[in-house]
Amino acid sequence: MTTHKLSEKKALPTGPAAAALIASGIGTFVIGLMTTGAVLSEGLKNFLNWWNPAGPLTGKVGIGIIFWLVSWILMHTIWKDKEYDLGKAFTITLVLIGLGLLFTFPPVFEAFE
Amino acid sequence: MSLTFREFWAASHGLLLGSVFLLAFAGGLAGLYSLRPELVTPAGIKERLGRLKLGTITMAVVAWLTVITGTFIVYPWYRAAPPEGADLTAYPRSFLKANPNLSGWHAFGMEWKEHVAWFAPILATAVVYLVLKYGPDLATNERLRKMAIVIFIIAFSAAAIAGLFGALITKAAPVL
């Protein structure tokens, strides 16, 4: 009875959920990419030094947050009234988070030093 | 018994915010897990949704406050370059790097912690959005609810890695 009542209401489209999930994966991935990128390129490391007391960390997370928010807004705008395969969105998200973790893991980025 | 200005901020960043974060995670996780129609009535779901919103929003807000205070207040003290001939105990990063037995705390611990910590607020914010946007739908959409739980646990794990290394690094080289 309870389940029936709750199910009667029309479900919201899954597009916004997919956008929020994938964008969070993009944000974490970009932080990882910037972390390893700063080891590979002295120029990128200097560019990421947005505030000297905290060093390149400010640029790494700043760019990660910009990518996260911009990608979220874009995907949300495109998918807000649409259905999106949640399984696919979740897989993409986990892969992006996994790559982000990998690229922030010191033994990985130190291998490029 | 007193705290210096720096010790106060280090304790606020790690201990105070960390404790609230832990409590909020427990509340949010319990809320997400139990938001199932077979466990509660529609009235119960409404009531649990309120607590779920409180738990997830608190966790996300605290995660943001923790990384912001850590990066912009405590971390600059940690990484400050010492002047020639200075006592390195006042410069944690240089102190750790100068000691071969302790350098791993910086090279592995701090290098991982400072980056992975930022995963927590981003992922926790995504979960807050799912809770606010879908609300009671999460009770019937088991798939989405389980996805939210996984992302919530990953957010917590990222913060736990950062918190654990933060505590251990502070023990080896406190910000004084």
Image: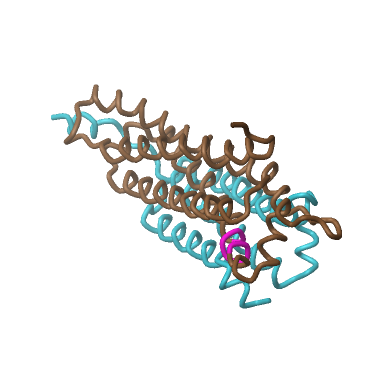
Chain colours: A cyan, B brown
Q: Residue at x 23, y 37 (%)?
A: B36
Residue A3 rendering spot, x and y as whole percentages: 18, 34
Q: Furthest-right residue in view? A: B84
Q: Residue at image x 65%, y 77%?
A: A112
Residue B166 spot, x, y in % from top left: 55, 51
In front: A28, or B17? B17
Magenta stretch mostly in which secondary structure?
helix
Q: Quadrant of the N terminus of chain A?
A: top left
Quadrant in which residue B134 is drawn? top left
Along the line of sight, the residue nearer the viewer: A112 or B47: A112
Residue B101 in view, yes or no: yes
Q: Is B107 covered by the magenta stretch?
A: yes
Q: Position of residue A69 (x, y in %)?
A: 61, 45
Q: In screen coordinates, is A36 left or right of B29?
A: right
> Which residue is farthest left?
A1
- Can you name the residue that lies furthest to the front here? B1
Does the rendering let one see residue B129? no
In this picture, is B165 found above or below B59?
A: below
Confirm whether the magenta stretch covers residue A90.
no
Image coordinates for residue B131, horizontal then vertical, percent: 40, 36
Is A56 on the left or on the right of A30, as rendered? right
Q: Quadrant of residue B42?
A: top left
Describe residue A63's horizontal placement relative to residue B172 as left or right. Answer: right
> Would you place residue A11 above or below residue A45 in this image?
above
In this picture, which residue range is highlighted in magenta? Answer: B105-111
Comparing A106 with B103, the one in front is B103
Q: Residue at x 54, y 62 (%)?
A: A100
In the image, residue B64 sits, relative to residue A24, either above or below, namely above
Residue located 68% across and 65% down the image: B97
For the residue pair A9 and B60, the one nearer the viewer reads as B60
Q: Quadrant of the C terminus of chain A?
A: bottom right
Q: Is residue A3 above or below residue B83?
A: above
